Image (tube, coloured by chain):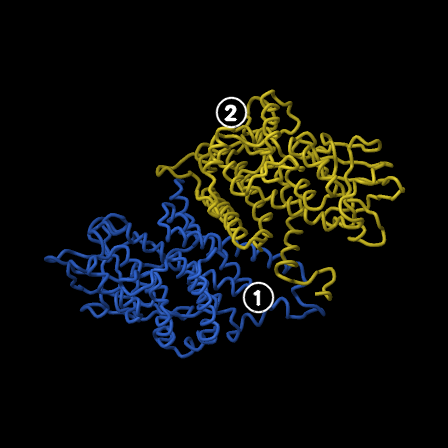
């Protein structure tokens, strides 16, 4: 693949290759997906060493500034690094919400002290972040959130409840949307950083249909938060949140391919040949299923081509384009369809819940299928994404106040 | 929209300006209502040729500009927007591709300059039945002396009444569905034994049934190797399909934009109907599909320009995805316009009819989904 923009990355490629060879433990080759599937899995010595090496190098957050512990790489260099990692089955152990969403947002909106305090610890995976946005009464209508934040002079006092806080039970800190003004809806929201060890913070994992508990309810009862933990201006939280959600959505669209939790690698058509069988011409022995697999593969390829097009357009226009707005819905649909097809291909072997009669991949498929139902709910549901396309791209009137059109 | 070079941007802008000023949908409507047998306006086609649109993929030594398939796609996208009828697709894209890919120097010299100037219309005479099945070839070419005798009938020949030369697939050996045994021939429309009959189609474009009755051809009429013409035919068809997809993209984008305008102006229950979420989400779905389809179409055209090894699968991907998208958008155009969309006076019906014709041309969605699966090995 050609390097974009004509930047000479030959020397960097050699440097990256040498460093990865010296530091990436062979035992972790290709294991990235499995480790992310189980966030609470005990970490091996190799995993810890690899995390430390990547953290010190700053390459888990390759394009972030060196001053805050990032890699300081150009976009072209970061692409080269990713290519070299892919080539040897290496993957970044530095991940999670700090890297995907909070870090980029704090780099944009945080003050110098906040950046110095928090960014380097994200770069080394020393601190894990969770997102305190949704509430029981504020899901799709996020701006109706009620968690109260009062100015007590030398500190903020927080009372309320968050829900769907991913990984809150393991998180060290929470970036939170709180209500600092009850008289205004959007302008009454502020962006606050809360240390999860503060007295009054309590988390309760929520058991999901997949049997996993990746989300929590998080309760704040008279939680005292230092004044300097406010990010951006008082009442300016909604603007920051919208920016952060853009990072979240572009991350959630994912590759539109396997979807998280799917341990079957390789083409889905090969899986169908193995489980369903082939006809005398060597084709999948179920014309209806073959047709639907084809339809799925076409949608997946169309999504991948759109991601590539979006990247090259963003590069040439140096700004966001309308294509990005469709990526979450298009990508999550592809991922969900793949889970459904995988389950159907596996037949009864895809419906095992536990035990030795099923392979690990088969058991992961059923959990992945159930977990995948969340793709079109979180990060702004499919319906909310359609609202956003209608309003922001197609310029159609707001259904709730059509006269304002 | 793909990242364009300067030539391509100029070409697109020129096409956009010309189609909107000189060839809006009203121009096509006029051609249709006149009942002119060709199905297009020769004067408008002459203007297009004058601007060089008929020579975009043709090498400079044969009178073209050699700008490539993505460039020609940009023009076809604009003509698709206004439903401009012209032989560019059949001749300057499909017919020219066959000769560029498989022609001898003498064949190129004989036909490409005339195609580039618009003087001659070339077209593919490939299909023999209701469905596109390029390997199904019953038209026979039997050896006679150093040459051949051609017999049989081709149907749904685009611009068949206007054509000066046909690129005909005929069987020189093998059974009727065998890929081996297919040969291609260049047959002048005025050759003895060639007759044609206009087909009246729902989209009002030019098409014909062409019959070859013991047409005698010299060996120099054969395009490519004897009995090994199927691969050349597939490569030619893939270029034609990719360009057709660009036209379909233009039609779909315009159908969508016209519908979106209507959602913003039609008032019911005291508000514009575009304020209703039931319609908004369907509009968002169409927008999403159009973005996905555009990626596929541009990838197919770019693959052809780059001689990429996965060209065939990208073309089938594009034809399947673009066909589904145009199908959806053309149906929604009628539905969302309501009663007015059912009237002949409104453009919705013209887009709907053209949509189905382009979907079926050179293989519909089912054909290309199946081809995509076969190319992927399942």
Residue lying at 56% horizontally and 45% vertically, measured from the top left:
A331
Q: Chain of mark 1?
A: B
- In this rendered view, identify the residue nearer to me: B242 or B306: B306
Q: Colour of chain A?
A: yellow
In the rendered structure, are the residues bearing label 1 and label 2 in contact, judged by CB atoms less than 8 Å apart? no
Q: Give residue B332's quadrant in the image.
A: bottom right
Measuring 76% from the left and 36% from the top, which residue is drawn there?
A: A217
Specify the quadrant that holds the C terminus of chain A: bottom right
In this picture, is B172 found above or below A202? below
Spot the residue most to the top: A45
Which chain wears blue?
A: B
Residue A131, quarter of the rendered image: top right
Spatial separation of the CA atoms under disc 1 and disc 2:
59 Å
Residue B367 in the figure: left or right of residue A365: left
Number of numbered discs on residues: 2
Q: Residue at x 37, y 53 (%)?
A: B305
Q: Position of residue B228 (x, y in %)?
A: 23, 49
Percent across and percent down for residue B18 are: 45, 72
Is B317 positioned to the left or the right of A118 in the image?
A: left
Q: Position of residue A379 (x, y in %)?
A: 66, 45
Q: Which residue is mark 1?
A: B259
Element on which disc 1 rests? helix
Instruction: Give the label, 1 or 2, closer to the camera.
Output: 2
In the rendered image, which quarter contains the N terminus of chain A? Answer: top left
Tag on residue A22? 2
């Amino acid at each position: 693949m050609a390097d974009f923009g004509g930047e000479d990355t030959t020397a960097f490629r050699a440097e990256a290759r040498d460093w990865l060879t010296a530091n990436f433990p062979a035992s972790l080759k290709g294991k990235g997906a499995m480790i992310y599937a189980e966030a609470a899995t005990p970490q091996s010595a190799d995993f810890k060493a690899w995390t430390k090496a990547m953290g010190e190098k700053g390459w888990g957050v390759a394009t972030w500034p060196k001053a805050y512990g990032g890699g300081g790489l150009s976009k072209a260099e970061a692409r080269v690094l990713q290519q070299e990692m892919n080539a040897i089955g290496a993957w970044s152990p530095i991940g999670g919400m700090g890297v995907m969403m909070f870090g980029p947002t704090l780099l944009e909106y945080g003050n110098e002290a906040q950046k110095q305090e928090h960014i380097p610890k994200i770069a080394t995976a020393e601190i894990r972040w969770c997102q305190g946005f949704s509430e029981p009464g504020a899901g799709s209508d996020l701006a109706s959130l009620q968690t109260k934040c009062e100015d007590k002079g030398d500190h903020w006092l927080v009372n309320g409840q968050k829900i769907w806080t991913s990984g809150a039970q393991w998180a060290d800190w929470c970036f939170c949307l709180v209500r600092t003004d009850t008289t205004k809806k959007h302008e009454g929201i502020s962006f606050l950083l809360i240390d999860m060890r503060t007295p009054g913070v309590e988390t309760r994992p929520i058991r999901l249909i997949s049997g996993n508990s990746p989300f929590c309810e998080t309760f704040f009862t008279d939680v005292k938060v230092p004044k300097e933990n406010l990010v951006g201006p008082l009442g300016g939280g909604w603007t920051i949140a919208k920016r952060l959600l853009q990072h979240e959505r572009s991350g959630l669209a994912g590759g539109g391919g396997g979807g998280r939790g799917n341990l079957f690698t390789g083409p889905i058509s090969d899986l169908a040949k193995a489980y369903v069988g082939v006809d005398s011409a060597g084709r999948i022995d179920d014309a209806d299923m073959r047709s639907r697999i084809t339809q799925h593969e076409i949608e997946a390829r169309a999504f991948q081509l759109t991601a590539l097009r979006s990247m090259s357009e963003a590069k040439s226009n140096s700004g966001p384009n309308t294509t990005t707005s469709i990526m979450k819905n298009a990508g999550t649909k592809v991922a969900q369809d793949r889970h459904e097809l995988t389950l159907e291909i596996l037949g009864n072997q895809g419906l095992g819940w536990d035990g030795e009669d099923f392979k690990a991949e088969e058991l992961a498929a059923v959990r992945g299928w159930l977990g995948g139902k969340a793709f079109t709910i979180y990060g702004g549901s499919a319906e909310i994404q359609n609202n956003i396309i209608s309003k922001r791209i197609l310029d159609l009137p707001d259904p709730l106040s059509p006269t304002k059109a | 929209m793909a990242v364009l070079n300067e030539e391509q941007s100029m070409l697109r802008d020129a096409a956009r300006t010309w189609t909107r000023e000189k060839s809006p949908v009203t121009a096509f409507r006029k051609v249709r209502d006149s009942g002119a047998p060709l199905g297009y306006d020769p004067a408008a086609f002459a203007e297009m040729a004058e601007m060089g649109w008929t020579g975009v993929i043709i090498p400079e030594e044969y009178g073209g500009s050699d700008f490539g398939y993505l460039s020609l796609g940009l023009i076809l996208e604009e003509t698709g927007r206004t439903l401009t009828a012209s032989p560019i697709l059949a001749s300057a894209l499909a017919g020219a591709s066959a000769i560029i890919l498989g022609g001898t120097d003498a064949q190129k010299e004989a036909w490409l300059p005339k195609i580039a100037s618009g003087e001659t219309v070339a077209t593919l005479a490939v299909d023999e039945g209701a469905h596109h099945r390029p390997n199904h070839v019953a038209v026979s070419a039997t050896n006679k002396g150093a040459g051949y005798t051609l017999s049989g009938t081709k149907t749904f020949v685009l611009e068949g009444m206007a054509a000066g030369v046909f690129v005909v697939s005929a069987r020189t050996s093998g059974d009727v569905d065998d890929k081996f045994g297919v040969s291609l021939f260049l047959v002048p429309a005025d050759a003895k034994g060639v007759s044609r009959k206009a087909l009246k189609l729902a989209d009002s474009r030019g098409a014909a049934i062409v019959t070859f009755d013991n047409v005698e051809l010299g060996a120099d009429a054969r395009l490519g190797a004897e009995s090994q013409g199927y691969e050349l035919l597939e490569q030619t068809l893939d270029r034609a399909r990719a360009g057709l997809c660009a036209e379909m993209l233009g039609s779909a984008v315009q159908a969508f934009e016209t519908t979106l305008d209507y959602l913003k102006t039609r008032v019911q229950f005291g508000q514009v109907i575009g304020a209703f979420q039931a319609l908004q989400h369907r509009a968002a779905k169409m927008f999403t599909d159009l973005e996905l389809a555009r990626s596929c179409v541009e990838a197919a055209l770019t693959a052809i320009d780059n001689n990429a090894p996965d060209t065939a699968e990208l073309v089938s991907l594009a034809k399947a995805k673009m066909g589904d998208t145009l199908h959806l958008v053309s149906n929604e155009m009628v539905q969302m316009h309501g009663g007015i969309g059912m009237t002949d006076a409104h453009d919705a019906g013209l887009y709907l009819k053209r949509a189905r014709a382009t979907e079926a041309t050179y293989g519909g969605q089912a054909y290309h989904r199946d081809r995509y699966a076969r190319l992927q090995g399942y």
